[in-house]
Amino acid sequence: MPSTPPPSPLTALSPLDGRYQTRVSRLRTHFSEHGLIKNRVKVEIAWLLALAAEAELGEIPPFSAAAITELETVAAAFNEEDSTAVKTIEARTNHDVKAMEYWLRTRFAHNTEITRVAEFIHFACTSEDINNTAHALMLQGARDEVLLPALDAVINRLRNAAHLHAALPMLAHTHGQPASPTTLGKEMANIVARLVRARKQIAAVTLVAKFNGAVGNYNAHLSAWPEFDWETFNRRFIESLGLEFNPYTIQIEPHDVMIELFDAIARTNTILIDACRDLWMYISLGYFIQKPKEGEVGSSTMPHKVNPIDFENAEGNLGLANAVLRHFSEKLPISRMQRDLTDSTVLRNMGVAFGHTVLALESLGNGLGKLVANPQRLAADLDNCWEVLAEPVQTVMRRFGIENPYDTLKALTRGKGITREALHSFIATLEIPQRERDRLLAMTPASYIGKAAELAGRI
């Protein structure tokens, strides 16, 4: 049987680990198998330190400063070689958390102070106490250190575009048809406003963890120390890790708060898909020009093309991310009675959802960096649509009590447009104050932008 070649970008099963590996590498720290094992070790060591620091648990003497330093150093410096050693043990145990527990015992076998309390490594814990806490830490780190900064970079690019083009008039389109003018900056500001709100919702999710034993009742804890307040102690332990404590669970933390985070990310991704499609359309209309990249090819046969590939890449990856995130939302809150393992394999794909999201954000940011507004094209479209001024004309007619203004303008413009000269001739016949007539005559499609520039400028 031929041997399997070592992994490489060309042989990787997933494009996240192949074609796009350098663009999502920041997530490996959090969501790789090594990242999971490292967080498990962090939790196990923190739990042992917490037990030893509790005066009421007399059988676990406090650690010396040197022992504390060694324990904390092992947690902080845990590396891929250590993970490999854990996986070697797992090949024998066929249980990942137990393998990590055995590795810890071996790792500190030289230290008599720690060896003396080795039975308190993983004390009273079910595997899910360790796993759910590790998963919460992984999500917290990936969100705060990778996802939110990537989203902030896109928001900042869009905000800069909103300010730069705040007063640049643009023909709006509703139902794909010419509509009341706006500004290019205001349309960017609309996206910013949505994303700022969505970002707050992602950041506001406080990750939770449970640490209450095999079925959530502290059975093992109380069998050893029946008078000790384990619930308060374990709550304090989880909160010391920067997480919120969940006191009511089965064997697993039910993942409801995880789903709040995943749903918030999916909603944000949907906003971004909408933005990608609109920006793609503005490029197609010529409202934006893309700066060509030296040496880049847009088509294998049409030399002139500069394709909006960054926005297309972003849209595709956002869709993939949401497909995974929505499966999480449907699957993870469901567990047969106190425990089944269907969540375990699903949770190993958190990095897939984050990876496609981060990849999309980078692509979108790259695309935004190539855009240059095209004022000539924007002006030409506006100057070709004087019919959009039917709205202000009929609105002023309403103000001064002229009958049937809407139907009059509808008959004049609907489905056929109108020239500047024809519209001015109509305005000249209106029985309204001269100053209002002069104001309408001075109005152009490019000047009829309402508060768009102000709104864009203050986003």
Image: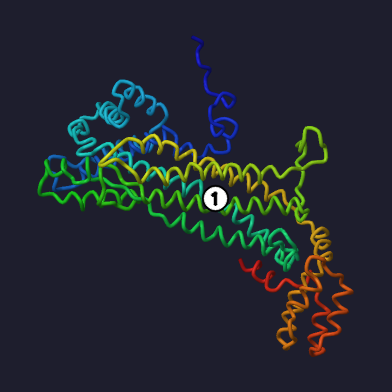
- Image quadrant of residue 18? top right
> Amino acid under label 1?
Asn
Residue 435 in the image, given as x and y percentages of width and height: 80, 88
Residue 304 in the image, given as x and y percentages of width and height: 82, 40
- Image quadrant of residue 373? bottom right
Of 283 and 151, nearer the camera is: 283
Residue 57 in the image, given as x and y percentages of width and height: 14, 44
Tell me if residue 7 comes above or below residue 164 in the rendering: above
Q: Quadrant of the C terminus?
A: bottom right
| Residue at mark 1 | 269
Of 318 and 459, nearer the camera is: 318
Answer left or right for 168 relative to 53: right
Answer left or right for 347 relative to 378: left
Q: How is the image coloured?
A: rainbow
Residue 76 in the image, given as x and y percentages of width and height: 37, 38
Q: How many marks?
A: 1
- Image quadrant of residue 300? top right
Tell me if residue 443 comes above or below residue 264 in the rendering: below
Of 433 and 204, nearer the camera is: 433
Q: Tell me which residue sits at (25%, 51%) in the image.
A: 248
Which residue is most to the top?
Answer: 1
Q: Tell me which residue sits at (37%, 45%) in the image.
A: 136
Tag 1, which secondary structure?
A: helix
Answer left or right for 454 relative to 263: right
Q: Residues within 10 Å of mark 1 (few under 14, many from 20)?
A: many
Tell me if residue 458 comes above or below residue 212 in the rendering: below
